[in-house]
Structure formats: C-alpha cells, structure tokens
Image (spheres, helix red, strand yellow):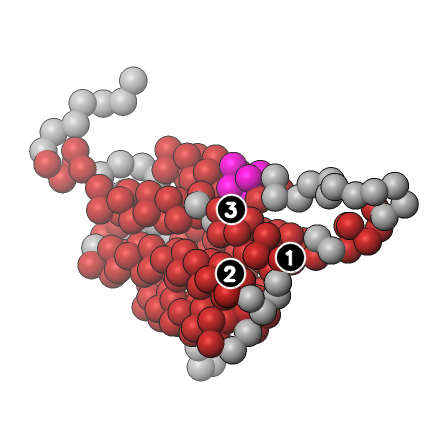
Amino acid sequence: MSAPRTGGAKFSRSETTRAEAFSDGVFAIAVTLLVLGLNDPPHQPGTLGRALAEQWPAYLGYFASFSYVAVVWLNHHQAFVRIARMDRGLHAANLFLLFTTGALSFPTVVVADALRADTAGTDARVAVALYAGLAAAMCLSWAAFYHRLARHPELTAHDVEPTYVRHGLLRSWAGALAYVLAGAAGVLVTPLLALAVFVVLPVFYFVTSEGLPTVGGTAARHDHQG
C-alpha cells in the first residue's frame, strides 16, 4: 500500500507507471481495431483474386493507420523515458492523445470504403477530409502534451535534452498543419494526393521520435531507453 499523501502538490502528482500501462493497452486495442477493416470480400467463384485486388484502399488505409499508431506508440515511449512524474494536466493531455488514437479506425474504414467506390468522387473527398481532421487532432493532442511539459519542467527527468520539448511542440504543430493541407488537397485536387501524405507523414515522426536534428548533433543519452 502506498504511503499517505499530504498537500495539494503531492496529491496531484503521481508516478508514470499506470499511465504508461493504460496507454499501451489503448494502443494495442487501436491497432487491433484497424485490422477489423480487412475482410474476405464477397465474390463469385473464380474471382477471388480480383475481389482481393479491388480492396487495395483497405490495405493502404491499414498500412497508413497502423504506421501512424506505431509511431505514436514509439513517440509516447520516448516521451515517457523523459517524464519523471505526472500531474492532472499531463494526465488530461495523455487522455486526449489516447482518445484521438482510439478513434483512428473509424476514418480509416470510411476512407477505404469511399475510395473503393470512386477514387475521385465526392464521398472520397469527404472521407480524406475526415481522416485528415482526426489525424490533425492527434497532432494537436501531442501539442497539448508538450505544452504541459514546457509549462511544468519539473515533471521531466533532470537529464532531459534541453531541446526535446521545444522540438516536440514544433513537430506537433507541423504535423497538424501538414494533415490540414493534405485534407485540403484531397478535397480540392484529388483524394489520392491526401492518401500519399497519410502514408508518408508517419515516416517523419519515426525519424524524429527523439527530436529534430540539431547543429553539431546531440549528446548521447545514458539512460534506460529501449
């Protein structure tokens, strides 16, 4: 049993273990929901190959969304390596992040169905706008997360890189802008252009999971990253 807590500050702060465990559970459920969008397509005997090929939007949507959730999990892990304790504001930002992540399967299925019907139609344009909107909201949830850390540096570990939180904010806002622009391009030009951005952006977040490159490189971290 944990020791009694006294004082408002001690009451509002806690270790990160439960938040990390709960978050990992949500990420696991999120990727499981994504795979439910893949199914055995209705087909006549001898036409299975064509029916499977016609489901390409579902495969691409699964790849884009799985990649997105995967890099969210990776970035979440890298963030919590650097967080020493939680307060209610950081818990709220983390829950906002999990809320948007858990909802990603919905626009993924909508986009796949719309593109299967017509890759350039009105429904496909609305679908990519929906996906872009939720993806941008996920980036904004990260912005809220990093903003809390910027406002309360006492929540981070003593040896956290001085540029990490600032770079996290820049990456979050850049991602939100990129997804909004991708959604606009999907509506105004072609949905396939937005889809290409949805596939590429997770690569950026993977490469920059420990922060943006800095002049002269960054000092090596001697901690428990893994």
30 within the magenta span: yes
Residue hosting label 3: 105
Residue in view at x 59 percent, y 52 percent: 113
Residue hosting label 1: 116
Quarter-of-image position of residue 87 = top left
Q: Nearer the viewer, residue 168 or 52?
A: 52
31 within the magenta span: yes
Spatial CA distance of label 2 from label 3 is: 17 Å
Quarter-of-image position of residue 190 = bottom right
Q: Residues within 10 Å of mark 3 (few under 14, many from 20)?
A: many
Q: Position of residue 170 (x, y in %)?
A: 36, 70
Q: Tag 3 or tag 2, which sits nearer the N-term?
A: 3
The stretch of residues the image draws in magenta is: 29-33
Residue hosting label 2: 123
Give the residue furthest to the top: 1
Residue in view at x 55 percent, y 39 percent: 33
Q: Amino acid at mark 1?
A: Arg
Give the residue furthest to the right: 46
Residue in view at x 31 percent, y 37 percent: 15
**What secondary structure is found at the residue carrying circle 3?**
helix
Spatial CA distance of label 1 from label 3 is: 17 Å
Give the residue furthest to the bottom: 215
